[in-house]
Amino acid sequence: MLIDPLLVSGGVSEALIFIIENYLVRIIPFIGIILFTGLVKGNRFIYNSFAMNYENNGFKALFLGLLIGFFMNGVCVLAAVIHGDIKLSFGFTLSQLPIILFALVCVFIQSASEEMWYRGFLYERIHANYPLWLAIIMSGLIFGFGHMFNNGVSILAVINIMVIGLAFAMAKWQSRSIWLVFGIHTGWNFMQNFFFGLPNSGVVSVVSVFGLDAVNTSGKLFYDTTFGIEGAVSLLIIGLLLALVSFALAFKSGRLAELRERSCQPTNKA
């Protein structure tokens, strides 16, 4: 008879504590950025850019972003499995479904919070005064620096996260939707931590659909034993690919001139 690990004493509470401490706690900066941009008159244009009916925002963009995030992480994990860097084991039971779904909601809060600060406030404030290309680059660089003190972080991991931050900014620019980036970021983090059971920024979840077989895991090309996929070359490749696809789509639409422009002067209307 299979024993559900969540039925072991303390299993559910341990999983809930992990999700709350690592993801739901980000509801504080999530609410903070909404209040800061909504109540401060000079930032109202940023607040408006978060709205569902702003440009291409909405559930369609969010869902597409989730699919992109799932795909990106899945490709990186598949490369690590095929290369023999990691081995995964399946341990999911239906009793875990509610807490996995709860985790998805909390990951969205955490991911959207980061995107509203980096690809929302920071990106838009720079773009209001400087060319778009600078807003894209700076949001990526500062995003990487913001992860410098994570558990087990390496130089390659910081570079990878800078590149993925730049790619997220490129995706936001091309799609004209921060909701798309909400979805990509959420999809990546959820798949990594709660589907595959791998470290997310150096932190391993106590509940996941798959689990890492630590005995058969080694630090090779596509996996870092401390920082996971994000510390390996695969994230660099997939991040550059997202940036290049965004650039190619913008080029096809004849929008490259926008990279040299500042945004329109923000209107402070609600």
Image: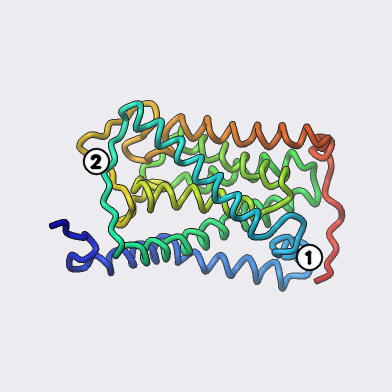
Horizontal relation, residue 197 to residue 59: left or right? left
Horizontal relation, residue 114 to residue 103: left or right? right
Q: Nearer the viewer, residue 224 or 85?
A: 85
Estimate the x, y position of residue 251 in percent, counting from the top left. 78, 32
Image position of 168 with respect to 236: above or below? below
Residue, far front: 1
Estimate the x, y position of residue 167 in percent, counting from the top left. 62, 39
Estimate the x, y position of residue 253 in percent, counting from the top left. 81, 37
Tell me the residue at 30%/34% (across/down): 86
Which one is earlier in the sequence, the residue at label 1 or at label 2? Answer: 1
Estimate the x, y position of residue 2 in percent, counting from the top left. 16, 56
Image position of 69 with respect to 53: above or below? above
Task: Classify 10 Å Cα crowding around label 2: few (below 14), some (14-19), many (20 and above).
Answer: few
Q: The residue tagged with tag 1: helix, strand or loop?
A: helix
Q: How many marks?
A: 2
Image position of 194 with respect to 257: above or below? below
Residue 42 is tagged as: 1
Tell me the residue at 46%/63% (across/down): 106
Q: Which residue is mark 2?
A: 213
Horizontal relation, residue 143 to residue 22: left or right? right
In which quadrant of the rendered image does the C terminus lie? bottom right
Residue type (three-letter) at the residue carrying disc 1: Gly
In which quadrant of the rendered image does the N terminus lie? bottom left
